[in-house]
């Protein structure tokens, strides 16, 4: 077995280094050797782990004291349980220079400054808001540090005192048979300290609930299922530790006219038979109130999709927009004037001749039958009979 290096040497600090100096040195070492920056480099990972272990001891006043007195023997077996993932343990420190890793951070309990927990809320936004971006005030009811006792929980003028149950360790040893277990001290809940006279404002909790409002900015292009991070708007830190972050899970409200698929938008466009047959230019108003000219080519069929580039949802990075897909929907009039009936009958006759020609050599019989059935109920005369006649022919 190799000899363990001195923790101060590992971090490159003096024996009497302040907490700040140790923190700074560890950050530097961690930055340099973090596995994310040195993929596949086992030596860097070993240095990273070594530095993390050193920091784990030297950043904790009591462990540092034991280490100073007894060396490695004083803290062996006292290492915090990393739960198999040494990297997540100090993530609160990393978040300051790695940009945070999202939720799931562990909150350190007990003595010393600890980062506040993250908060998560869900917000439903409209399609319009997702296209234009939006700012919204979100009400949160969260505990904040009690002002009267500055978060200590002890009556102003008094102090917390070391827990008599565990002597300030936060943990106690219990024997079961031949085996010794360490467990969280039941008297102080692992805090290591207890309160003799609790603060009356917060009843000793150190925190009070307060409603507050946070302005959340939804950038243009944001989609449902995405998560926004609002730094520093989570729960307050303990004993001067930094606050956690607020995470906003975005939900997209369904829109009556538009569907969103990634950066693309889809909508239906109602066209008359004449418009579809002859072609037209129609204006579609997008959820963000902008107009789009849609060119409908002559001979457009029901269900045909007309795509307009660059008229979808803006990309969240501001680099252009997706596409707009317009699905043609042909409307059949429910009531007709006598004149319209006359004209349609004439038209049917005209088209019927053309259809006969194509029916003979194309397998379009099914389409023709469908159209005939739809047109049948309102029309009582020539149009219907000619459709029926054609149906018989193609069947
Ligand atoms: Zn205790
Ligand atoms: Zn208080």
Image (cartoon, helix red, strand yellow):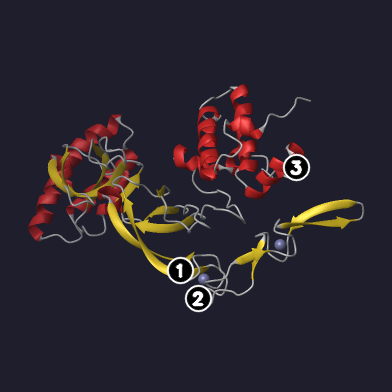
Left or right: residue 340 versus residue 4 is: left
Which residue is pictured at 46% across the width and 42% down the height? Answer: 96
Sequence-wise, which precedes: disc 3 or disc 2? 3
**Residue 248: image location, x then y, percent:** 42, 54
Other residues around mark 2 within 10 Å, as few (<14) / some (14–19) / many (≥20): some
Return the residue nearer the eye: 18 or 98. Answer: 18
The image shows residue 269, relative to residue 84, as above or below, that is: below
Q: Nearer the viewer, mark 3 or mark 2?
A: 3
Residue 74: image tag: 3
Is 8 placed left or right of 298 in the picture? right
Q: Is residue 233 left or right of residue 191?
A: left
Q: In the image, what residue occupies the spot 85% across and 52% down?
A: 180
Q: Nearer the viewer, mark 1 or mark 3?
A: 3
Assign a secondary structure to mark 3: helix
What is the x, y in percent for residue 376? 26, 55
Q: Which numbered marker is on residue 201?
A: 2
Callout 2–callout 1 Cβ contact below 8 Å: yes
| Labelled disc at residue 147 | 1
From what the image shows, is residue 122 above or below residue 275? below
| Disc 1: residue Cβ within 8 A of ligand 2's nearest atom | yes
The answer to whether the residue labelled 3 contacts the one labelled 2, judged by CB atoms less than 8 Å apart, is no
């Amino acid at each position: 077995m190799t000899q363990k290096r001195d923790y101060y040497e590992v971090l490159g600090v003096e024996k009497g280094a302040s907490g700040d100096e140790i923190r700074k040195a560890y950050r530097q070492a961690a930055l340099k050797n973090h596995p994310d920056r040195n993929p596949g480099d086992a030596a860097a990972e070993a240095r990273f782990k070594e530095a993390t272990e050193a920091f784990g001891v030297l950043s904790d006043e009591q462990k540092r004291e034991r280490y100073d007195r007894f060396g490695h023997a004083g803290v062996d077996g006292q290492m915090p349980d990393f739960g198999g993932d040494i990297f997540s343990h100090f993530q609160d420190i990393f978040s300051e220079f790695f940009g945070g890793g999202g939720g799931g951070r562990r909150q350190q309990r007990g003595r010393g400054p600890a980062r506040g927990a993250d908060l998560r809320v869900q917000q439903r936004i409209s399609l319009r808001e997702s296209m234009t971006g939006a700012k919204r005030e979100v009400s949160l009811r969260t505990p904040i540090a009690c002002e009267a006792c500055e978060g200590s929980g002890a009556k102003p003028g008094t102090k917390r005192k070391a827990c008599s149950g565990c002597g300030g360790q936060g943990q106690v040893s219990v024997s079961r048979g031949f085996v010794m277990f360490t467990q969280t001290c039941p008297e102080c809940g692992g805090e290591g300290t207890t309160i003799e006279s609790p603060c009356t404002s917060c009843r000793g909790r150190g925190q009070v609930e307060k409603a507050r409002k946070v302005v959340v900015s939804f950038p243009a292009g944001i989609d449902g299922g995405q998560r926004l991070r609002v730094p520093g708007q989570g729960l307050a830190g303990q004993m001067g530790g930094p606050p956690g972050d607020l995470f906003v899970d975005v939900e997209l409200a369904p829109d009556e006219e538009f569907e969103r698929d990634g950066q693309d938008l889809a909508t239906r466009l109602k066209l008359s038979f004449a418009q579809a047959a002859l072609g037209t230019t129609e204006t579609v108003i997008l959820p963000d109130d902008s107009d789009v000219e849609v060119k409908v080519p002559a001979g457009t069929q029901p269900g045909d999709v007309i795509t307009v580039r660059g008229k979808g949802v803006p990309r969240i990075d501001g680099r252009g927009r997706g596409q707009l897909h317009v699905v043609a929907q042909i409307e059949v009039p429910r009531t007709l004037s006598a004149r319209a009936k006359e004209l349609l009958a004439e038209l049917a006759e005209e088209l019927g001749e053309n259809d006969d020609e194509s029916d003979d050599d194309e397998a379009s019989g099914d389409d023709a039958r469908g159209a005939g059935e739809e047109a049948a109920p309102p029309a009582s005369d020539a149009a219907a009979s000619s459709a029926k006649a054609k149906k018989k022919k193609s069947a």
